[in-house]
Amino acid sequence: MKNGLQVAYTALFVDRDCYKFAHFVNETLGVVYRIVGLEAVAAFFTLEAGEMFSEKR
């Protein structure tokens, strides 16, 4: 992660390559999107399982 931040910083401020920086930002947002999606699915299944077990009693 630290190396990725260093590469993004270099792309934006040292090389002045905005397209390379935008690419790194897009990759980062893609990873965040996947993680948040998986957490939402896990939370949904956890809540539904809790309701199923509470209804059986």
Image (tube, grey):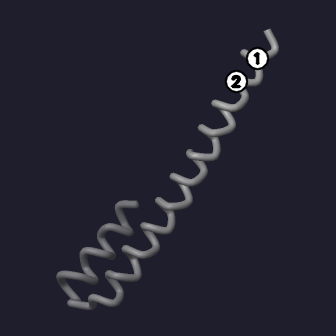
Lateral position of residue 16 relative to residue 30, left or right: left
Q: In which quarter of the image is the N terminus?
A: bottom left
Give the number of callouts: 2
Give the image location of residue 4, x and y in percent.
Answer: 38, 69
Q: Distance between the residues labelled 1 and 2?
A: 6 Å
Q: Which amino acid does label 1 sit on?
A: Glu
The residue beneath circle 1 is 55
Q: Specify few, some or many for label 2: CA neighbours under 10 Å numbering under 14, 14-19, or 20 or more.
A: few
Give the image location of residue 20, x and y in percent.
Answer: 35, 86
Q: In the depicted view, which residue is nearer to us: 51 or 5?
A: 51
Tag 1's secondary structure?
A: helix
Q: Specify few, some or many for label 1: CA neighbours under 10 Å numbering under 14, 14-19, or 20 or more.
A: few
Q: In the depicted view, which residue is nearer to us: 41 or 26?
A: 41
Residue sitting at 63 percent across and 41 percent down? Answer: 42
Lateral position of residue 32 relative to residue 42, left or right: left
Quadrant hosting residue 48 = top right
Give the image location of residue 9, x and y in percent.
Answer: 25, 74
Is the C-beta separation of discs 1 and 2 under 8 Å? yes
Give the image location of residue 22, x and y in percent.
Answer: 34, 82
The residue beneath circle 2 is 51
Residue sitting at 51 percent across and 52 percent down? Answer: 36
In the displayed structure, 53 sits above or below 16; it is above
